[in-house]
Amino acid sequence: MGRFWSLLFLSVPILGVLTFLWAALGWYPLEGHWFPELVVADSSIDHLFYVILWMTGLVFIGTGLAMFWFLWKYDDTKHDGPVWYSHGSHLLEIIWSVVPAVVILFLAIYQMDAWAGARMRRPMLENGQPKPPIARVTGRQFEWKIQYPGNDKQFDTPDDLYTTNDLHVPRDEEVVLEITSEDVLHSFFLPNFREKQDVVPGMKQFIWFKPVKDGKYDIVCAELCGWGHYKMKGQITVESASDYRAWLEKAYNEQELSEYSLAEAE
Amino acid sequence: MSSITADGQATHAHTSNEFGVGEFITTYVFSRDHKVIGLQFLFSTLLWFLIGGLLAIGIRWQLAWPWSDMPVIGPMLFSAEGGQISPEFYTMLFTMHATVMTFLVIIPILAGAFGNYLIPLMIGADDMAFPTLNMLSYWVMWPAFLFFGGSFFVAGNGASSGWTSYPPLASMTEAAPGSGLAQTMWLIALTCVGISSMMGSVNYMTTIIQMRAPGMTMMRLPMTIWGMFITALLQAFALPVLTAAGFMQLADRLFGTGFFVPEGLIVNNSEMAAGGGQPLLWQHLFWFYSHPAVYIMILPAMGMVSDILACFARKPLFGYKPMVYAICGIAGLGFIVWGHHMFVSGMNPGLGMTFMVATMMIALPSAVKTFNWLGTIYGGKIQFTTPMLFALSFVLMFVIGGLSGIFMAATPVDIFIHDTYFIVAHFHYVLFGGTAMAVFGAIYFWFPKMFGRMMNEPLGKIHFLLTFLFMNGTFFTMHILGAVGFPRRLADPYHYETFRHLLPMNQFMTICAILMVACQIFFIVNFFYSIFFGPKAGRNPWHANGLEWQAPSPPGHGNFDFQPIVYRGPYEYGSPEVDEDYYPQTQPPNQRGDTDEPATMVNH
Ligand code: HEM
Ligand SMILES: [Cu+2]
Ligand SMILES: [Cu+2]
């Protein structure tokens, strides 16, 4: 039976790697079972994921094969002779502490830039001021309220534009969003943008990205926010700068017609 | 010490002829014997394991066949909705599933059941340092059982703000159907679990430090004991924080304080009176306990696996001291990495950088342990018994869970995979593939000691094979869902276009999950049948070295029928000094090679 169990354990690295390969290649029946299409300029998250996937993949295959080989070879019923009576090896301990340490340290340093880009280096204007948000996104049970500052670039003035679950952003521009919550925690998740940020009541936060591909994509709420959490769904539309401005104008005019009804409801 | 009878049972003064009701109660119900308490924990946690598993099937049912009538169970549970799972009910399901599994299964089964049963036996003591406290630690679990269990039957059908219970959702009764009375009961139950663990932790630390048999130095302790010891330390330092946080949340809910609620919240169209608090504060306090808790849920398992591996590889554990240091390293680092649960929470990104580096570091001791386990089986004479299979699968599954942790430790990658099924895959590899598999292995391994009978090997192997296959079928595929960004905790993820095509994959996983739960029947049958009818086990059926194997099976009151004296570490398998391939810790040094270790009573 030792042979059988060794092979069973061997099947883990083999099937594991195959599953990942299959999904990454998008072969039947796993089409679309990998990253959703990337629509922003910054691909550093995907890149990092692959770097880690390669590293961990090698370790996974290595340990899996080693384990299989030891089980196969040292099966009690198949192999005679004394055991290797050893309490350990100082040299080996040092090797397998230092090598992973170096790899891990490399990774830790290697990823810092991507993190800083995503969370610390907010886009600047020419004059060195932080770029103002293009819109404010407010989470509430169970919808995304979107507020555009209007021509005066100031929030909470009469020319603000309000929409619900419908966010439009211009293509090829650094877009900054201000996000906040009115009741509980939500999480503003754009799978195609590799962007996610918890939305915390009492806090004002900024996120930014540079969309490069036109289209309509899901806004997902990724933090449990109550029973209706699953239906808290918005849509983000990426379009050319001119289309974007046309949309803003049209939406604003529609809102004028309904006499600030949305604004006053608040 | 007491005298020995023919069948190896210790005779004790109080063994009287009239075994009255009072005696029955003090022996089996309010027992102060660590072994009985350990078994009480074992039976209770196994029962809750089953309940938790059934809750998981509810979750999986909804994800595979959303909004469809559940056969048989559906009409029984929620006839109002025509046998469908409602979104409220789904929220409750995953909250209570996770709560039950962490707080009523994994933590108490490791520390409460195995810790209690094994610690005195393995260090050569006759009981815990504080037997009455020990008894209480089991009985305060009962309010926890009752409150968690009872919360299913009050409005909202159970707490439903996630097992992490993040405010403001959890601290405002208005926020969700299940955040009324059910959530209050949840908090009270959690406190009881905390008190129980605290009592246990004090007991384990004292016992291990004070009550070791002569010759049992710290560096001769079995790894199981090291795991339990460090876990007890973790609990002692981390638990007070969670308990305090729990009280603060209770106060927020019951007395309108605002520890975790910021100013001016509008919930259900009414403005909250309380304010001035911070939701992130809860997350810091909660994870300050609950991150170490994930080590509380794995270190004892790592210890038990080390013992099992050495025993069935018939050779010494590779690198005993580095293994001990690795456990200490994991525990130490475990306290400074809680923030990795909060990379996208709104916490300062600079802090995220710090937590990232600390988290990466924790991969090191984990790697050391893995390589040492491989070193242990290398060059051995491997016996593929059921406990060994479970222990081996622990190693392999822990590798997967550990490696996927590196993805999440990388802050930018975590932005994408946080709160997706990648996370769910990760912690199930650690907790189910890891801890739960180790627990099964430990049950098969120590069963002969606990009940004096052997479990059935073929049945055990079938149980292992099926559990192993379906476990991987259920959880490995979750990595793939995570890569798509499939979020967790959604009653209907197919509401979003991005995830609509993942339904068949989810159905596959659900079928695996149902089969995984179903095949536990092999375990249940084997377990109960063997308790009564299994072949009788001798003192040392596995030819192991630990002290517990020198005591009678099952050990009588007071454990040992002789005074154990320890001459060596627990991993002397295949030693050239003796003819057998094992060399029990209590066996006086052999005539042939006894010069290096004098049989003195050292360090006690
Ligand atoms: C019978 C096998 C099990 C199955 C099929 C299963 C299934 C699941 C599923 C599908 C979820 C995701 C819920 C969601 O986030 O939407 C989940 C969550 C979870 N499970 Fe399990 N599980 C099993 C066993 C265990 C065990 C042994 C543990 C041990 C501690 C455990 C601990 C957890 C935890 C902590 C969560 C997190 C829930 C959350 O807050 O999102 N599970 N489980
Ligand atoms: Cu939400
Ligand atoms: Cu953690």
Image: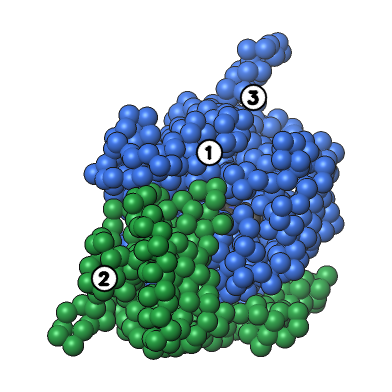
Chain colours: A green, B blue
Disc 2 marks which amino acid? Answer: Gly
Q: Can the viewer see residue B550?
A: no
How many other residues sit within 10 Å of disc 2, few (<14), some (14-19) or many (≥20)? few
* Disc marking residue B28: 3
* Disc marking residue B350: 2
What subunit carries mark 1?
Answer: B
The residue depicted at 76 percent of the width and 41 percent of the height is B82
Disc 3 marks which amino acid? Answer: Tyr
Horizontally, is A185 left or right of B435 in the view? left
Foreground tag (1 vs 2): 1
The residues bearing labels 3 and 1 have C-alpha atoms spaced at a distance of: 37 Å
Circles 1 and 2 on the same subunit: yes
Q: Earlier in the sequence, mark 3 or mark 2?
A: 3
Residue A228: give x, y in percent of width and height: 54, 51
The residues bearing labels 3 and 2 have C-alpha atoms spaced at a distance of: 55 Å
Residue B448: give x, y in percent of width and height: 72, 45
Q: Nearer the viewer, residue B296 or B157?
A: B157
Q: Secondary structure at mark 1?
A: helix
Circles 3 and 1 on the same subunit: yes
Residue B206: give x, y in percent of width and height: 39, 39
